[in-house]
Image: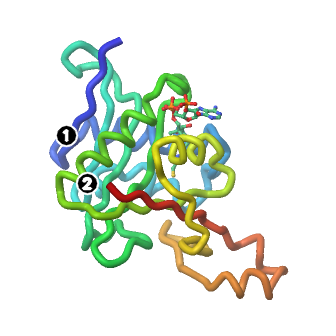
Amino acid sequence: MTTAVRVVTPEEKSRLQEIGELTALAYLADGLVDNAHPFVPQLRDAEARARHADLLAMIDGEKATGAIVGTITLVPPGSPFIEFAQDGEFELRMLAVSPMERGRGIGRTLTRAAMDRAVEQGARRIVLSTMDTMHSAHRLYERMGFARREDLDWVVEDNADGTVTKVSPEHLEQDPPCAQEHVRLLGYSWEP
Ligand SMILES: CC(C)(COP(=O)(O)OP(=O)(O)OC[C@H]1O[C@@H](n2cnc3c(N)ncnc32)[C@H](O)[C@@H]1OP(=O)(O)O)[C@@H](O)C(=O)NCCC(=O)NCCS
């Protein structure tokens, strides 16, 4: 099957709707979030990602007119979508592949496209973070040359609006009764 990866713009309303639904579905299907989780509206809001970052999508079909099969967001320095990148680093976020299209190399191709685009824009380091249950993603990133960086791990608590607040890892360790509300995110980095 022929596929193409391209940037999707804020004007492409029906494509943005499709990407938002696919992103939420990919996370829901893996049990990473449930429907009530405050992060789900953010996953669905592909338009915000298109406005404030580089929203990439892979589209099936000879002339890229088919269905969206996967997406990734490349976040440049200064974007409100930066979560933990520092000092001019680029960040990768919300990689998602349709549950029906997994294992075909789509995640890898999208990640490679985002890495290439970051390098074109002058990136000297790309960082990303994952939940510890994202085993497919860990393997994918490590096979693509990302280094696991425990020093970049961070612990968050979810806010009602879908954003997260960073809390210190020490707090997690010292305060087990609250541990359920806190999530440890695992850091990775890559340099060209
Ligand atoms: C992670 C995800 C994007 C992978 O998409 P994909 O298109 O299936 O991945 P690919 O086919 O490109 O596979 C790339 C690598 O991932 C690994 N992989 C893919 N599916 C896997 C699975 N079910 N179990 C274990 N490893 C898997 C493979 O090792 C593969 O590398 P290899 O073929 O060289 O061994 C997809 O599973 C997904 O959308 N997950 C939910 C959202 C998520 O976790 N996002 C990460 C955000 S940080």
Crowd class of label 2 (few under 14; some 14 to 19; many from 20; radius 10 Å) = many
Rendering coords of residue 181 (x, y %)? 71, 72
> Compared with residue 191, is residue 83 higher up or lower down, i.e. above or below?
below
Q: Residue at x 57, y 59 (%)?
A: 148
Q: Determine the CA span between mark 2 and mark 1.
A: 22 Å
Identify the element where label 1 is drawn: loop
**Amino acid at circle 2:** Ala
Q: Residue at x 37, y 38 (%)?
A: 110
Q: Which residue is mark 2?
A: 118
Quadrant (top left, top right, bottom left, bottom right) of the N terminus: top left
In which of the image's four quarters is ligand 1 placed?
top right
In the displayed structure, does residue 1 sit left or right of residue 165?
A: left
Task: Find out if the beta carbon at label 2 lies less than 8 Å from the nearest ligand 1 atom.
Answer: no
Q: Earlier in the sequence, mark 2 or mark 1?
A: 1
Mark carried by residue 12: 1
Rendering coords of residue 124 (x, y %)? 28, 64
Residue found at the far right of this picture: 177
Closer to us: 105 or 166: 105
Crowd class of label 1 (few under 14; some 14 to 19; many from 20; radius 10 Å) = few
Closer to us: 114 or 122: 122
> Compared with residue 102, is residue 81 higher up or lower down, i.e. above or below?
below
Quadrant (top left, top right, bottom left, bottom right) of the C terminus: bottom left
Identify the element where label 2 is drawn: helix
**Amino acid at circle 1:** Glu
Q: Residue at x 53, y 79 (%)?
A: 165
**Count of numbered badges drawn on the protein:** 2
